[in-house]
Amino acid sequence: MRHLLAALSCAAACALAACTTAPPRYSPETRELTLLTVPLLSRELEATYPFLRDDFAPGGVLEGKEVYAFVPSSLTVVEGDTIHFTFVNPEDDAHDFVLPGLSVPIPGQSVTHASYRAERPGIYTFVCSVPGHLPAMYGQLLVLPAAVGAGFGARAPQ
């Protein structure tokens, strides 16, 4: 009987220990992310897309404008991660990258680097604030809660 009680006590202790095991924790990572500034619609594309000629002509819907974008425009990291951004601007026009807590000028024909720490979970919009580059030149940074990131194991999605 004493062995049975000892075995039951041991089983109960093991079951209790299993219930109190701490959930996995996320270890913040350093992520290398590259964004390109790309022209989607520019005057230089008129030869390739003749329909743009009327759009860029005086009175056209794109008169005096060009349409740019960040590629990729959606980024995902985990709370606590440090992001090392590389911005590649292969064209002559200057841009910038503005995210709450970060503003980076991106000169024409350049590769620019910046770092950012994702402090809080949420969805954060980033933009190019150069006049005329909005509304098309924007994107979103999704910062997942650390508790969610713990479920990814060694690597979170990028």
Image (spheres, grey):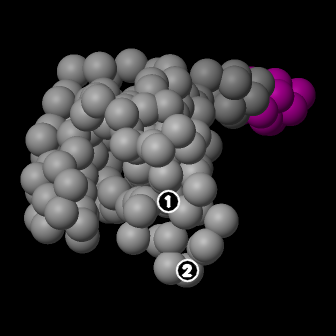
- Residue 156 position in % (x across, y down): 51, 52
Q: Label 1, on which residue? A: 40
- Residue 50 position in % (x across, y down): 61, 73
Can see residue 147? yes
Q: Nearer the viewer, residue 127 or 12?
A: 127
Q: Earlier in the sequence, mark 1 or mark 2?
A: 1
Q: Is residue 36 magenta?
A: no
Q: Is residue 55 above or below residue 138?
A: below
Q: The disc labelled 1 sits on which kind of residue?
A: Leu
- Residue 116 position in % (x across, y down): 21, 36
Q: Label 2, on which residue? A: 48
Judge the density around disc 2: few (<14), some (14-19), many (≥20) Cα neighbours within 10 Å: few
Count the labels in the image. Answer: 2
Name which residue lies at 25% across and 34% down.
130
- Residue 122 position in % (x across, y down): 50, 21
Q: Is residue 12 above or below residue 107?
A: above
Can see residue 30? no
Q: The disc labelled 2 sits on which kind of residue?
A: Thr
Q: Nearer the viewer, residue 109 or 158?
A: 109
Per the image, label 2 sits on a secondary structure element best described as: loop
Q: Nearer the viewer, residue 155 or 18?
A: 155
Q: Which residues are magenta?
A: 1-11
Per the image, label 1 sits on a secondary structure element best described as: strand
Judge the density around disc 1: few (<14), some (14-19), many (≥20) Cα neighbours within 10 Å: few
Give the spatial CA distance, label 1 vs label 2.
12 Å
Name which residue lies at 39% across and 70% down.
44
